[in-house]
Image: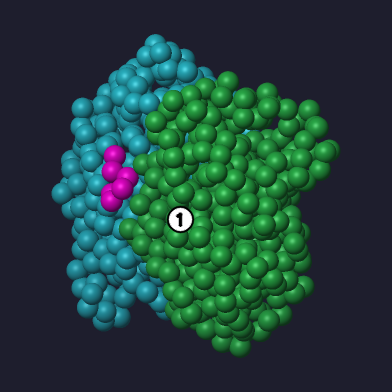
Chain colours: A green, B cyan
């Protein structure tokens, strides 16, 4: 088992990464102490594969259990589904000693984390992420949210779990698309924050592509450690440090929004957005911006090479002409979407741009013409 | 002006109490700095009296302003109204530099505080409480919430405002019922937490009943100071210290729930609940419980005397036979409601009981027979 402490002022907790740990969920929950009831939230797909295993492990420890199954997919991150969970909690007699357990991917984690954060002003929340994306990204850092019809993650809370349990073995049951989507964020960690890790990925491409459990255990733990460190320095996105996690995200989010959330897998958006950000840095370097002096074509090619070998797209063209030819993904429309992002300040175009392998900087107010040039 | 610091780890702020301060809301908001937009939430009644004054003060400082008016009354603490506010914020282009301003009583404060706490995972929140109850209680302490159909305050967050501005002059426009409801909480502070303050109330009954502004300024500031101190020691209701604010609330809440929330004014419930709690302490004393040795009939009479002179009920009978004779307010039903309260642990009957004037203790697991005896 690899244990990663997440050190926060009042809300420190530990992420445990271990193969086959799904079988011992009940032990972890019982060890929290003073648990009146376990409120397990999962989606229909995860429930059909792991629901029984996890439920049995919980009941076998003598804990009272309620299971709530929501439809899989982004549509469940809605006020309506959140409302049905609050009502269900109340009916089940959930009190301040109850624990919400999220068994699933990012949707289940974001949704049930928000419901836990707000039920009776906050009850304990335990995460068991089952998608690669959730294991390396959304289960770390305490961001919970639901969507408004016109705004993703517009309603939510910073709310830390009391514990996270990650079983890399569950990754074997993911669809290719879901698996690759997680790899998009993983490349991001290496390219923008950790050059040793990027090298590790380059030398383990074969094992990653066959989902070797022991390599995945190392990869997941490494990503959690990188993110936990940054979150500890800036829990609520105040100092700007946390923004360093957003390499590839400015245009990645714009691409996702342009195609309608849920169409383009998040990791694909990050992947394409990262290559675009790299090209943007190279363009600024060519224009004489000394901050990007180490960014050149060879650097971009190395990132493209790893991205492609892990099966990820570097442009919308790689996914299909119907995406790249859509009027929604026109450079001008993407620019508008990037400017209206929740993280944009005063409508400015802000980017996380690479300065060398494993190191990035926050660049405010990039010239729209430079972004358009990269998008064209 | 009386300034009361509320000292919390990351979220310290100041409560300013000053006559006529409503005219300078804009100055206070501008001084927060970095304000992209002011989102003023108020109810229709408050809006008709103070809406223009406050809006002008804000606009005169050059701040961008959106005003959202919700219907007055408990019904506005609903998911539907919260949803309409989130949507309105999004439409108005609210971002992380926007400030939500609650102008109104407890309903407006609880509702808009929850919406501020959750919009984009939390934006700044500024309180201008206009009811006596909100000025002395709900605007201090960071509790925000909305109701579920079957549970008051079941969905919410602990979320501190960035500032509170209290103008005691607005109390002159309150209805008698609303004014007295606030007095119920004020007597509570004296009786259970501050004997000097109880004495101050006894010697100022006449001025309180004519709503003398300078006496009210002192009273409001004193209550805020008492509550701020306790909240600073136990922000999120973890150590039990914060429970000390709940004298009169176990049965007070039960009475409110029995009659349907919004029927019995909260302060009336607290008032009746406090007298019942005092009688319960006296009963335990008579049965030989040494903790309550100082509680006797004379002590109870003194509390009853102040309560009555400030126009508050000491039993449902005082309000009307239709209340006291209802099957909903039968001792047995009240007992059931008190046991199912959000604050009850494992279905036990817990009370804050007085041990002498200005001092109370937390008593766990009171014998239901003793509670029934007091209710009969």
**Residue A208 in magenta?**
no
In terms of depth relative to the viewer, which is nearer, A327 or A288?
A288
Q: Residue at x 23, y 41 (%)?
A: B5
How dense is the environment of label 1, judged by Cα within 10 Å: few (below 14), some, or many (20 and up)?
some
Where residue B197 appears, as percent x and y from the top left, is: 19, 46
In terms of depth relative to the viewer, which is nearer, A230 or B132?
A230
Where residue B139 appears, as percent x and y from the top left, is: 38, 41
Q: Secondary structure at mark 1?
A: helix
Q: Residue furthest left?
A: B196
**Residue B12 in magenta?**
yes
Which range is magenta?
Answer: B8-13
Left or right placement of residue A299 versus residue B277 in this view: right
Q: Is residue B22 visible?
A: no
Left or right placement of residue B97 versus residue A186 in this view: left
In terms of depth relative to the viewer, which is nearer, A166 or A331?
A331
Using the rendered view, name the quadrant where residue B209 is placed. top left
Mark 1 chain: A
Where residue A152 appears, as percent x and y from the top left, is: 63, 42
Q: Residue at x 40, y 34 (%)?
A: A291
The number of discs equals 1
Task: Name the dominant secondary structure of the magenta segment.
Answer: loop
Using the rendered view, name the quadrant where residue B225 is placed. top left
Where residue A84 appears, as percent x and y from the top left, is: 69, 56
Residue indicated by mark 1: A195
Left or right placement of residue B240 versus residue B7 in this view: right
Q: Residue at x 27, y 75 (%)?
A: B285
Say which quadrant the N terminus of chain B sits in. top left
Q: Is residue B125 above or below residue A306?
A: above
Q: Residue at x 36, y 62 (%)?
A: A7
């Amino acid at each position: 088992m690899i244990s990663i402490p997440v050190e926060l002022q009042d809300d420190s907790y530990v992420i445990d990464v271990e193969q086959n740990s799904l079988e011992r969920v009940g032990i972890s929950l019982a060890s929290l102490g003073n648990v009146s009831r376990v409120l397990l939230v999962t989606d229909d797909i995860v429930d059909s594969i792991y629901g029984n295993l996890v439920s049995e492990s919980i009941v076998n420890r003598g804990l009272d259990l309620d299971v709530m199954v929501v439809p899989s997919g982004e549509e469940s991150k809605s006020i309506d589904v959140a409302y049905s969970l609050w009502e269900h909690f109340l009916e089940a007699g959930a009190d301040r000693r109850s624990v919400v357990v999220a068994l699933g991917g990012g949707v289940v984690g974001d949704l049930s984390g928000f419901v836990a954060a707000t039920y009776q002003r906050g009850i304990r929340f335990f995460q068991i992420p089952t998608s690669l994306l959730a294991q390396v990204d959304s289960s770390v850092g305490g961001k919970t949210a639901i969507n408004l019809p016109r705004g993703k993650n517009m309603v939510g809370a910073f709310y830390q779990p009391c514990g996270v349990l990650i079983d890399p073995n569950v990754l074997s049951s993911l669809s290719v698309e879901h698996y690759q989507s997680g790899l998009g964020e993983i490349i991001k960690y290496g390219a923008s924050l950790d050059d040793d890790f990027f090298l590790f990925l380059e030398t383990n491409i074969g094992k990653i592509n066959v989902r070797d459990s022991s390599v995945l255990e190392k990869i997941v733990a490494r990503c959690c450690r990188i993110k936990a460190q940054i979150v500890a320095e800036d829990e609520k996105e105040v100092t700007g440090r946390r923004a360093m996690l957003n390499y590839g995200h400015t245009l990645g989010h714009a691409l996702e929004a342009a195609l309608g959330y849920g169409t383009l897998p998040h990791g694909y958006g990050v992947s394409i957005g990262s290559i675009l950000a790299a090209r943007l840095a190279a363009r600024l370097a060519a224009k004489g911006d000394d901050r990007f002096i180490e960014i050149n074509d060879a650097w971009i090619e190395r990132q493209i090479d790893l991205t492609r070998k892990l099966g990820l797209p570097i442009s919308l063209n790689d996914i299909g002409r119907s995406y790249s030819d859509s009027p929604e993904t026109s450079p001008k429309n993407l620019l508008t979407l990037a400017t209206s992002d929740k993280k944009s300040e005063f409508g400015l175009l802000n980017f996380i741009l690479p300065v060398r392998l494993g190191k990035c900087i926050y660049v405010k107010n990039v010239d729209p013409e430079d972004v358009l040039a990269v998008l064209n």
